[in-house]
């Protein structure tokens, strides 16, 4: 089976760079994949993609050695299994509140007897290899998002969930949970301290911790703080920033 680069980098003690796909198109997915991110996430929760878009986007990503990841819209086994069957090598599950929900997410990603995943890797076997079913349990990465008051209250129990590979910090919803206005790259001392608490709990449990960032500067700080994966930027954010910069430069030079 094709090895999961994310797991290999983690075994080597390296931090993984993750890019984000909010636009539901194979071309933008391919372009982002060719830029050099270690992994790319198709966002089904807040992006414009639907499940019908996942297969062509994963096909575009898999022309490179970038690892294909999908954030599902909800902790729903059917959607998780479908994304995996289409070739996702990592699953991000939002709004995980307790150990029971974390265990449900893990079970949907693992074949019996470890989990409850149904056998039918329609595209995954072509991407992953002929022995995919025999080895998928050891290669697929499962990440639970910690971003609610209940999730924070059950942090240690979630991190101790057997088979969970990482917890993923959603900074905007975490801001809500802390009574703060939602934003990315939140410098608020309470938010920063909470993120460090999540990081410490994950490492204590022997799993990894991911920080969702919105800039290289904040991501670099997260790497220095010990995070194992950083989401750096996304297709839509880069398009907006690039177009805005060109317009502002034109206005400045022709004022």
Image: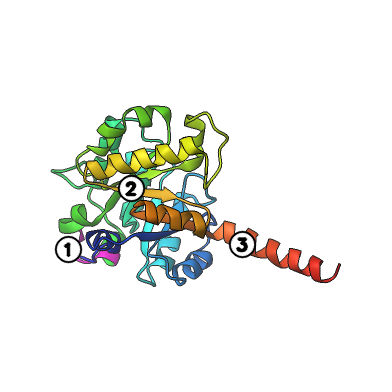
Q: Are marks 2 and 1 in contact (CB under 8 Å)?
A: no
Q: Residue 209 carries which label?
A: 2
What's the distance in space between the residues labelled 2 and 1, CA to CA? 29 Å
**Mark sitting earlier along the chain (2/1):** 1
What's the distance in space between the residues labelled 2 and 3, CA to CA? 28 Å
Q: Looking at the figure, which quarter contains the C terminus?
A: bottom right
Front disc: 2 or 3? 2
x then y, percent, for residue 97: 36, 31
x then y, percent, for residue 126: 28, 66
Examine the structure image and report whether residue 228 is included in the region drawn in magenta.
Answer: no
Residue found 47% across the figure and 58% down from its top: 232
Q: Residue 131 carries which label?
A: 1
Q: Which residue lies furthest to the right in this view?
A: 255
Front disc: 1 or 3? 3
Residue found 50% across the figure and 70% down from its top: 31
**Placement of 36 over or under 216, stated as above or below:** below
As rendered, which of 212 and 84 lies closer to the eye?
Answer: 212
Q: Residue 239 carries which label?
A: 3
Instruction: Identify the element where label 1 is drawn.
Output: loop
**Placement of 253 over or under 154, stated as above or below:** below
As rendered, which of 163 and 132 lies closer to the eye?
Answer: 163
What's the distance in space between the residues labelled 1 and 3, CA to CA? 39 Å
Q: Looking at the figure, which quarter contains the N terminus?
A: bottom left
Front disc: 2 or 1? 2
x then y, percent, for residue 247: 74, 65
Question: On the picture, is 211 further left or further right than 159?
Answer: right
Instruction: Identify the element where label 3 is drawn.
Output: helix
As rendered, which of 212 and 126 lies closer to the eye?
Answer: 212
Examine the structure image and report whether residue 131 is included in the region drawn in magenta.
Answer: yes
Q: What stretch is highlighted in magenta?
A: 127-132
């Amino acid at each position: 089976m094709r090895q999961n680069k994310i797991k290999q980098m983690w075994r080597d003690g390296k931090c993984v760079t993750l890019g984000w796909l909010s636009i539901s198109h194979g071309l933008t997915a391919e372009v982002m994949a060719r830029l050099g991110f270690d992994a790319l996430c198709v966002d089904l929760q807040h992006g414009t993609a639907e499940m019908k878009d996942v297969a062509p986007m994963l096909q575009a990503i898999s022309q490179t050695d970038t690892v294909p990841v999908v954030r599902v819209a909800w902790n729903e086994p059917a959607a998780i299994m479908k994304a995996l069957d289409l070739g996702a090598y990592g699953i991000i599950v939002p709004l995980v509140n307790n150990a029971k929900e974390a265990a449900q997410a893990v079970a949907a990603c693992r074949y019996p007897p470890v989990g409850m995943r149904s056998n039918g890797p329609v595209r995954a076997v072509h991407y992953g290899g002929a022995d995919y079913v025999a080895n998928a349990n050891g290669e697929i990465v499962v990440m639970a998002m910690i971003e609610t008051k209940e999730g924070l209250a059950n942090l240690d129990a979630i991190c101790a969930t057997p088979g969970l590979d990482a917890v993923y910090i959603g900074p905007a919803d975490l801001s809500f949970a802390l009574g703060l206005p939602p934003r990315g790259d939140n410098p608020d001392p309470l938010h920063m301290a909470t993120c460090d608490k999540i990081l410490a709990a994950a490492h204590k449990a022997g799993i990894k911790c991911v920080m969702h960032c919105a800039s290289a500067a904040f991501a670099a700080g997260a790497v220095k703080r010990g995070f194992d994966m950083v989401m750096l930027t996304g297709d839509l954010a880069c398009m907006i920033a690039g177009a805005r910069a060109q317009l502002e430069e034109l206005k400045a030079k022709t004022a």
